[in-house]
Structure formats: C-alpha cells, structure tokens
Amino acid sequence: MFGLWRERAAPDGPNAGNAPETYAEWSAWFERFEHGGEDDVLLGLAQRGKVNWTRGMANSFATRAAGTLHARMETIRLMLQRHLEKSTDVNDLGRAMVNARRAFAQLSRYATLSCWPDPLPAQLADMIRQTTASIQKSLLESAASDRTGRLAKMLRDNPIDRDLAPTTMVTENGHASQTSGRRILL
C-alpha cells in the first residue's frame, strides 16, 4: 500500500523498544515514524509514552509532531499522484484512492494518540482534514474535464476526505483494540 509499510529491521539502540519519555527519545521516535514501515510498533510505543509538556518544550514538541505529520502526508500525496498518473482505468484510480484513504486513516491513529496533551490532537486531526479536503477538491476539479463523467462519479463515490476513523491497533498481548466511533470498512 503505497510502499510506506515495508518491513524494516528495528533499529539498534538502548531505547529502540521502550516507550518514549524524554525529548531525545521522542525525537528519535519522530524520525522513525516519519520514515514509515513500522507504524504499528511505533504507535504502540507512543501510546505507552509520556510527554513532558512544560512551557519550554511545548512549542518544540508540537512543531516536531506537526512536521512529522506533514512529511508523512506529503509522501502519501506524492504516491497518490504517481499512482493516478499510472492508472489505466477507473478501477486503478479507485484502488489508488482507497489505498490513500487507508494511509490517511493510519495517520489519524497518530493524530489521536492518548499521550498527546491538549490541544495537539485537535490540531493534528485538523491538518489531516485540511489536506484530504484539498486533495479531494483538486481531484474533482481535474475530473471536470472528463466528458463521460465517470471519473467525477468515482471520485464522489470514493472520496479521499471521507471521515477517517483510526484503524484498529494490535496490542502487545495480540488482541486488537477497538477504536471508538464509526468505522469505515474499505
């Protein structure tokens, strides 16, 4: 799915498998998450992590969290664009849209981590909403030149900016934790 979730070996280091607590540990965590490939492991670690939300660190931490999210969204946008350019029919286009929506749903898990202090989750979720709405608007504007209308219909039927529910996460004991709210089955 867009090559973001390829398997990677866990990096060696003293805190490679520990929940982040210090800014240095969070910084290393953000770098690993930005590169993708081990989202479930990293999101599980972050869920158990702690954020030292002091006056001096709050701005740096929020900037780093937003920068990481922006980098991941840009990667998804570029991969969607590449897949759309290579698509040969409406079915390929639909698959690319569904895969991008799944990737954005994974980022919704990042935005709604329980370790984030307020107002960070709302800000991160808003970044995702704005990006997906912008992509959807751009795609619909591009589809206006299609005389058959099939492309525009497919884009309306499979919008990338559909409400994104975070995907289910597998916990350490192997059980899936259910997300609250409405789930969209893709």
Image (tube, rainbow, N blue to C red):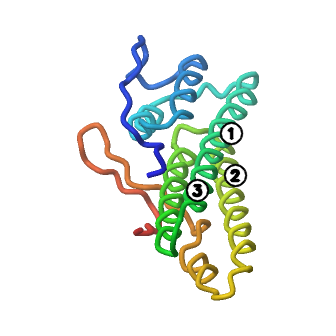
- Mark 2 surroundings within 10 Å by alpha-carbon count, few (fewer than 14), some (14 through 19), many (20 or more): some
Residue 12 appears at what percent x and percent y? 39, 14
Residue found at x 51% / y 28%:
32
- Counting from the top left corner in percent of width and height, residue 54 is at 69, 25
The total of numbered circles placed on residues is: 3
Write the residue at 48% across / 43% down. 4
Q: Which of marks 3 and 1 is nearer the N terminus?
A: 1
Could you tell which of marks 1 and 2 lies nearer the N-terminus?
Answer: 1
Q: What residue type is labelled 3?
A: Leu
Q: What SS does tag 2 mark?
A: helix
Question: Quick one: quadrant of the C terminus?
Answer: bottom left
From mark 3 to mark 2, how far is it between C-alphas? Answer: 18 Å
Examine the image and state in which quarter residue 69 appears.
top right
Marks 1 & 2, CB-CB < 8 Å contact: yes
Does 144 sit above or below residue 186?
below
| Alpha carbon distance from label 3 to label 1 | 21 Å
In the image, taking residue 171 as reference, residue 164 lies left or right, namely: right
Report the residue marked by disc 2. 127
Compared with residue 74, is residue 27 higher up or lower down, i.e. above or below? above
Which of the two marks, 3 or 2, is nearer to us in this view? 3
Label disc, if present, on residue 66 of the rendered structure: 1
Label for residue 80? 3
Answer left or right for 53 relative to 154: right
Q: Percent x, y for residue 73? A: 62, 47
Which of these two is toward me, 20 or 37? 37
Three-letter amino acid code at disc 2? Met
Distance from Cα at disc 1 to Cα at disc 2: 8 Å
Mark 3 vs mark 1: in front: 3
First reached walking from the N terminus: tag 3 or tag 2: 3
Residue toward you, 172 or 53: 172
* Residue type pointed to by label 1: Ala
Q: What element carries label 1?
A: helix
